[in-house]
Amino acid sequence: MNHNEHFLKIQKSTSILPFLHIIENLKTTPRTGWLNFNIENPESIASHMYRMSIISMLCTVPSINRDKCIKMALIHDMAESIVGDITPFDQISQEEKHKRELDAMLTLTTKILPETQSIVAKEMLDLFLEYKEGKTAEALFVKDIDKFELLVQTIEYEKKTKKNLQQFLCVLPKIKNPLILEWVNDVLKERDEFWKSINH
């Protein structure tokens, strides 16, 4: 029985510790995409979500609920504490990926967290579902932040390793928010200057 199986067998606890022990996996699980490109000691899922949350704090769009975005950024990959970081390389359909992640979130919020946390548990599940549905202004903004943070990490790893990680720029056409597009331009300019300095 592995770490997760032990805690998933707990139907309801009066303690938040079983929940926290599972969430710990987010701190220690590396992001799969970087492993696939042989990046040494890559960022964890939690570190990705942390910087997304910080980026969310920088939102200056009046029509977007900044606090909701911060929470959503912290929650959106929480299911990966159970299912892991599933990528296209895993050859798992989007439908199956969504099902696994939803099952994981339902387990975390309805079976692992104690009854005393039921209000927060519902908020977590609602934020997760809102993000996955991708229809509200906040969900769309956080989805763009998810991609933007990936771009920032890409240039940081390119500088560190001198590897061309062009493949990760495939997310560029999917970013729509004007504010984030401004930030993207800064990233691309920095990347262009870096590679020019390397090639000269």
Image (cartoon, helix red, strand yellow):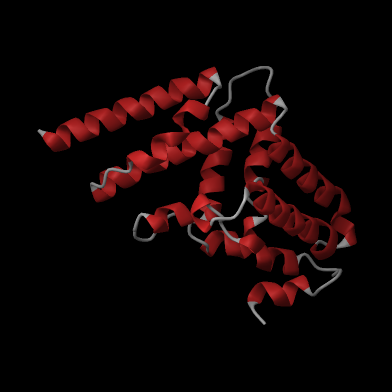
Q: Position of residue 118 (x, y in %)?
A: 87, 53
Q: Indicate the quadrant where residue 7 lies.
A: bottom right
Above or below residue 185? Residue 124 is: below
Question: Residue 164, image x and y in percent?
Answer: 27, 43
Q: Quick one: 168 or 69, which is closer to the camera?
A: 168
Q: Residue furthest left?
A: 200
Compared with residue 135, is residue 120 higher up or lower down, i.e. above or below?
Answer: below
**103 left or right of 30?**
right
State whether residue 31 appears in this view: no
Closer to us: 17 or 171: 171
In which quadrant will I find the N terminus? bottom right
Q: Residue at x 78, y 47 (%)?
A: 125
> Residue most toward the bottom?
1
Q: Quadrant of the C terminus?
A: top left
Whether residue 115 sits left or right of residue 138 in the image: it is right
Residue 153 versus residue 35: which sits nearer the camera?
35
Q: Residue at x 59, y 60 (%)?
A: 84
